[in-house]
Image: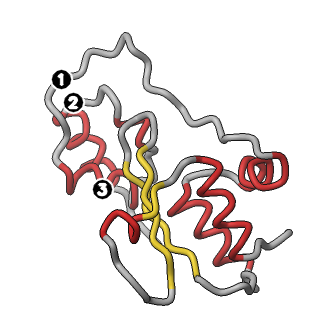
């Protein structure tokens, strides 16, 4: 697995159009730059990247950044960095009728623990979300 430099990670967020949160808040200093991005589904993503010129030395850390912060796969990441190709992110279907939203804590648990994607939550009612959460809670874990 190819591991990126901090510069390549900064290049990715610039290509995709992430906002530099430090510039927005006029923050100075610190050891990382902070970025925010709103996906087409309305999900807000956050990441931070070292000011340094080094590189990531641990593949698990890089995989965590891809999965939990950037919400992108490795192929799309390198396509952006190497070829300047903006990643294609899922867009919610326009035919879905939006109803009442799901409770934020419940949505977070469905994403982080049940491993649903934000796209899977689109169009889900509060009752459906609660049922999915109860199903997950009732399953034995190792």
Q: Mark 3 or mark 1, which is nearer the start of the sequence?
A: 1
- Residue 98, horizontal then vertical, whole percent: 24, 21
- Residue 103, horizontal then vertical, whole percent: 16, 47
Instruction: State the CA–CA distance, disc 2 to disc 1.
Output: 7 Å
On the image, numbered disc 3 is attached to which residue?
108
Q: Residue at x 42, y 58 (%)?
A: 36
Label 2 with label 1: CB-CB less than 8 Å: yes
- Is residue 49 depicted above or below 123 in this figure? below
Which is closer to the viewer, label 2 or label 1?
Answer: 1
Q: Residue at x 19, y 40 (%)?
A: 102
On the image, numbered disc 2 is attached to which residue?
125
Query: Badge 2: few (under 14), some or many (20 or more) residues near its Cα, within 10 Å?
Result: some
Instruction: State the CA–CA distance, disc 1 to disc 3.
Output: 18 Å
Instruction: Tell me if 45 is positioned left or right of 96 in this view.
Output: right
Instruction: Tell me if 83 is positioned left or right of 104 in this view.
Output: right
Q: Please tell me in which quadrant of the rendered image residue 27 appears.
A: bottom left
Query: Badge 1: few (under 14), some or many (20 or more) residues near its Cα, within 10 Å?
Result: few
Q: Mark 3 or mark 2, which is nearer the start of the sequence?
A: 3
Label 2 with label 3: CB-CB less than 8 Å: no
- Is residue 11 depicted above or below 87 in this figure? below
Q: Residue at x 75, y 41 (%)?
A: 85
- Residue 59, horizontal then vertical, whole percent: 74, 77
Q: Nearer the viewer, residue 134 or 45?
A: 45
- Residue 126: mark: none
On the image, numbered disc 1 is attached to which residue?
99
């Amino acid at each position: 697995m190819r591991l990126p430099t901090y510069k390549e990670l900064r290049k990715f967020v610039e290509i995709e159009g992430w906002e530099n949160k430090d510039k927005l808040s006029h923050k100075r200093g610190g050891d990382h730059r902070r970025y925010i991005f709103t996906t087409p589904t309305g999900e807000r993503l956050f990441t931070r990247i070292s000011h340094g010129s080094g590189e990531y030395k641990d593949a698990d850390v890089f995989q965590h950044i891809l999965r939990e912060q950037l919400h992108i796969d490795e192929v799309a990441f390198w396509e952006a960095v190497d070829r300047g190709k903006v990643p294609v992110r899922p867009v919610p279907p326009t035919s879905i009728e939006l109803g009442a939203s799901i409770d934020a804590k419940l949505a977070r648990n469905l994403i982080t623990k049940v491993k649903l994607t934000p796209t899977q939550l689109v169009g889900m009612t509060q009752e459906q979300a609660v049922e999915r959460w109860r199903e997950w809670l009732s399953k034995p874990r190792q």
